Image: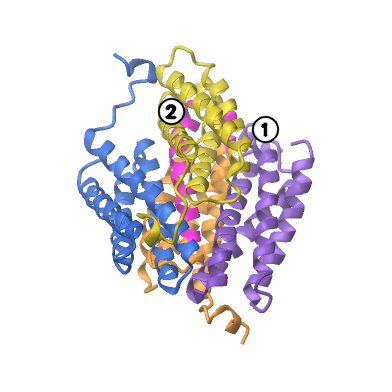
Chain colours: A yellow, B blue, C purple, D orange
Amino acid sequence: MTQSQSGMMPALTQQMQDCIDACMDCHNICEEAMSSCMQQGGQAQMQIMRALMDCSETTRMCADMMMRRSPMAGEMCAVCARACDMCAEACMSMPDDEMMMRCAEACRRCAETCRAMAGASM
Amino acid sequence: MTQSQSGMMPALTQQMQDCIDACMDCHNICEEAMSSCMQQGGQAQMQIMRALMDCSETTRMCADMMMRRSPMAGEMCAVCARACDMCAEACMSMPDDEMMMRCAEACRRCAETCRAMAGASM
Amino acid sequence: MTQSQSGMMPALTQQMQDCIDACMDCHNICEEAMSSCMQQGGQAQMQIMRALMDCSETTRMCADMMMRRSPMAGEMCAVCARACDMCAEACMSMPDDEMMMRCAEACRRCAETCRAMAGASM
Amino acid sequence: MTQSQSGMMPALTQQMQDCIDACMDCHNICEEAMSSCMQQGGQAQMQIMRALMDCSETTRMCADMMMRRSPMAGEMCAVCARACDMCAEACMSMPDDEMMMRCAEACRRCAETCRAMAGASM
C-alpha cells in the first residue's frame, strides 16, 4: 500500500480533488485578471479589483485547507462559494473583455464545486 | 487578436508558465506533506515542518507574482529557489517516506526552474 | 477633513479597529506558537499545529479584509471566530505551556470580537 | 525562567521585534491604501496598486517568517526592503493624497529596518 509510509493519511476523494482543482484554476485566473485590470486602469476595472482580490485569496486558502485536510475546509468552502459568486458577477460587468469572461466562468465553476463540498460531510 | 480586449497584456512566456506550474505543483505537495507530517507527529517530521511552511509560502507568492507580472517576480524566484533547496534537503531526511520523496522531487524541479527565471531578464 | 484627499474613504469604526487588532494579535502569537511547537516536536504539539495553521491564516485574512473594507469581511469574521474557538481548545490541551496559554487567551479574545463583528451589519 | 515551558525558544531580539512591527505597520497601511485606490479608481491609483500588492504580501510574509524564526527570514528581509522601496516611490507619485504619504513613510521605515535585519546575522 503506497500510503503506508505516509502514516496512512487518507487519500483525497475525487470530489475534493476536483474542488481543489477548481479553486486553483479560479485563483490563477483571478491573479491574471488583476494584472489586466491594473494595466487597463479604468473605473470599471477598479470596481472589479475588490472582488478579484477577495476571490483570489479565498480560493487559495480554501484549496490549501483541503490539501491539508483541515477541519475548517467545509466552512471555508461555503465562504469561498460566495466570494466566487460576487467575483463572477463583477466580471460580468465587462462582457467585451475576454479575460473577464474566462474569469467569470472559472468563478462559477468554482462556486458550484465549493457549494457541493460545503454541503458534503468532510 | 485575442489579447486585444484585455488591454494588450503580454502573454506569459513558456518559460514563465513552466515556472508557475512548477511552483504550484511544489506548493500543493508541500501542503499535503505538512498534513502527513502532522498526522505522523514524530520528531523528524517536526523538523521538516519548518522547511515545508517556508517552501509552501514562497512558491505560492512566487507563482502569484509571475501571474500578476510583478516587477518583483525575478527576485522572488531567487528566494524561492533557496527555500526549495532547503525543503528538498529536509525531505531527504526521511528516505522511506514516499510522500517526502515526491515532495523532494517537486522541490528540486521548482528550484531549477526558479533559478533559471531569476537569471533571465523578466 | 483629513479623509478628503483619500477619496472620502470612511474611517474604520472603533469596533472594527478593535477586531482588526484582536485578529493581528492572535495571528502573531499563533506564528510564535507554531515555532515553539516545531521546536518541541512532541506528539501533543503536532496535534496543535493544525489548529494553529488554520487560526493563523484565517485571522490574517480576516484582518486584511476588514482593512480593505471587503464586503466579505462579515462572513470571514464568522469563520475566523470558529477557527479561533478550535485553536483555543487545542492550546488548552497543554495547560503547563505558558505560550500555549497566552495563545488560547488571544484566540478567545479574537473569537469574541469576530463573533460580534459577524453579527453587526458591515 | 518564563521561556522554560515553551522549550527554550529564544526570545526575539529587540531589533527583530522592531522589524516585525515595522513590517506589520507597513502591511496594514498598504491594505488601507489599496482600498483607497480602488475607491478613487483613477489611472494613477491603478499604477500604485501593483506596488501596494507586492509590498503588502512581502511585508506580511517577512513578519511571519521572523515570528516563526525561519532560516529564510534574512533573505526575505532583503526582498521586502526592495518591495518597500518600490512602493514608497509609487506612493510619492500622489503627493497630495494624505494616505499615500503615510504609506510612503511606513514603507521607508520598513525598508530601513529590513535592510538592517538582512545585513545582520540571523
The residue depicted at 63 percent of the width and 31 percent of the height is C7
Q: Mark 2 points at which residue?
A: A33
Q: Where is residue A87 in the image (x, y as percent from the top left)?
A: 55, 27
User: For residue A80, what is the image quadrant?
Assistant: top right
> SS for tag 1?
loop
The verdict on residue D51 being magenta is yes
> SS for tag 2?
helix
Chain to which the residue tagged by mark 2 belongs = A
The residue depicted at 49 percent of the width and 36 percent of the height is A15
Quadrant where the C terminus of chain C sits is: top right
Q: Mark 1 points at which residue?
A: C8
State which region is magenta: D35-64
The residue depicted at 43 percent of the width and 16 percent of the height is A97
Q: Distance between the residues labelled 2 and 1?
A: 27 Å
The residue depicted at 25 percent of the width and 55 percent of the height is B108
Q: Position of residue D82 (x, y in %)?
A: 38, 52
The amino acid type of the residue labelled 2 equals Ala
